[in-house]
Every structure is written in C-alpha cells, then in structure tokens.
Image (cartoon, grey):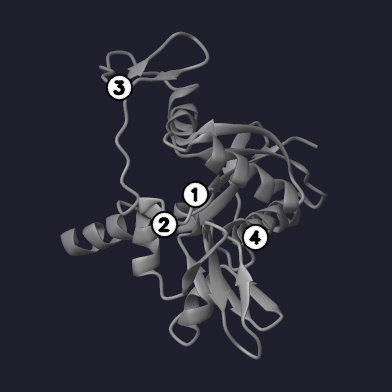
Amino acid sequence: MAAIGVHFGYTCACVAIFKDGRAEVVANDAGDRVTPAVVAYRDTEQIVGIAAKQGRVRNAANTVVKVKQVLGRSFEDPEVQTHKAESKCPLVNKGEKPMYEMTGETTRHVAPQDVAKLILHKMKETAQSALGADVTEAVITVPFEFAHAQKAALRAAAEAAGFRVLRLIHEPAAALLAYGIGQDCPSGKRYAMNYRSTPFYWRNQKDHTELIGRFFIFIFYVCL
C-alpha cells in the first residue's frame, strides 16, 4: 500500500492518496475534502471534525481549536500565551507544559499532543475509507518555522494515531511539489525559491499563526 499525504493545519486538516496516476485529496464522511481541526470532549466521548465545530457554541469550554499553535511548546512560550488568551477552552500550566482543562462530571487535563492524535487518526480513517484498506505510512506537512520539539511532538502524535511517519515535509515544499512538478513554467520569475533539481531549497519565509484559512475566507466573502 502506498503512503498517504496528510496536511495538519491550524484550522483544518486534509489527506491525499495516490490513485490512477495522480494525487487526490479525498472527502471525509460528510463529503468535504477538508476536516475542521477541532476536537470536543464530553465526559468519556471525543468528537472530531465538523460535529465538534458545530457544537462549539454549546460546548466551548471543552472544545479545542488551533491546537497546532501550542503543540510541542512550553507553557511560557509567547505563542502559547497568545493561544491561552484566545481559547475558550482553559489552558493551564502542568509541569511547564500547556494542558487543556476539561470540565464535566470530573475535571481532567488533556495534552495538545493527545488532541492532535485524534485529528490525525480521523485523517487515517478518511484515507482508509477511500482506499478500502488499512493505511499505516504517511508523509505529513509541517510549517517551515517548526522547531525540533514541535516536529517531535507532531511525529509522536501521528505514531500514536497509528501512522509510521516516513517524512515530515515543510509546507512550502509541499505546495511547490503540488503545483510545480509536471507543469510547464516557461518564463515565470522566481524570487523566493532556488531550483536545484531536487530537493528544493526555501530561502525566506515569514509566518503569522493568525493569518490562517478562516481569514482568507472572510476576505473572499467581503470582496464578493
């Protein structure tokens, strides 16, 4: 069985398979090709994806969004503090590590890595449903700025979800592979990339964790 490709984003996740000579992003059980990277907790139940997002208003204190922002970071990290201020789900300090505090019949604490595991497992199920076979090997995208600790946390979450991670690939490189390989580009100028056959070398990038998919959707809505 060929490996699959997984994009684990701040607001959504998706999975691609290689079929009939081309890569195809497959739809989830709701028919969507992207799944909200949202996890809701209700006592012993964990809800992932669109159902978790739809129930967020009623269960905001136990619903995690943008877990990627805190994955593999210490509690005092500025990104974690920003996330803490914005999150409706309480984020607390446990041994200098951020933990989500879930309330219900009992109070419990959930690590960001465990939240990520559920999202990645959902991607695994989506791929298996499309292929009709078990999936174990995956290539996963990571932001260019991810440090070793963040990459290690994502890899551990993927392994806990049942994947054998073949490689973590930077998101800009993944985009280049998706739109550049196999397509003619006769006279286009390249300012950020240095092409040297393979691999590709990314020269510069500036990242903003707040500049994510939902803001582009809002911009498109306003323009239309």
Label 2 belongs to which residue?
80
Kindly report which numbered mark, 4 or 1, lies closer to the viewer in this rendering.
1
Per the model, the C-alpha gap separating discs 1 and 2 is 7 Å
Label 3 belongs to which residue?
192
Q: Earlier in the sequence, mark 3 or mark 1?
A: 1
* Residue 96 relative to residue 219: left or right: right
Per the model, the C-alpha gap separating discs 2 and 3 is 29 Å
SS for dot 4: helix
The spot of residue 102 in percent (x, y) is: 57, 78
* Residue 83 relative to residue 129: left or right: left
* Residue 193 relative to residue 224: left or right: right
Disc assigned to residue 114: 4
Q: Residues within 10 Å of mark 4 (few under 14, many from 20)?
A: many
Q: Earlier in the sequence, mark 4 or mark 1?
A: 1
Q: Quadrant of the rendered structure where residue 145 is?
A: top left
The spot of residue 202 in percent (x, y) is: 39, 22
Q: Are marks 4 and 3 in contact (CB under 8 Å)?
A: no
The spot of residue 215 in percent (x, y) is: 29, 58
Give the residue type that dot 3 points to: Ala
Q: Earlier in the sequence, mark 2 or mark 3?
A: 2
Give the residue type that dot 4 points to: Asp
Kindly report which numbered mark, 2 or 3, lies closer to the viewer in this rendering.
2
Per the model, the C-alpha gap separating discs 4 and 3 is 35 Å
SS for dot 3: loop
Is the C terminus in the top left, top right, bottom left or bottom right quadrant? bottom left
Label 1 belongs to which residue?
73
- Hey, which residue is sitting farthest left in the picture? 223
Q: Earlier in the sequence, mark 4 or mark 3?
A: 4
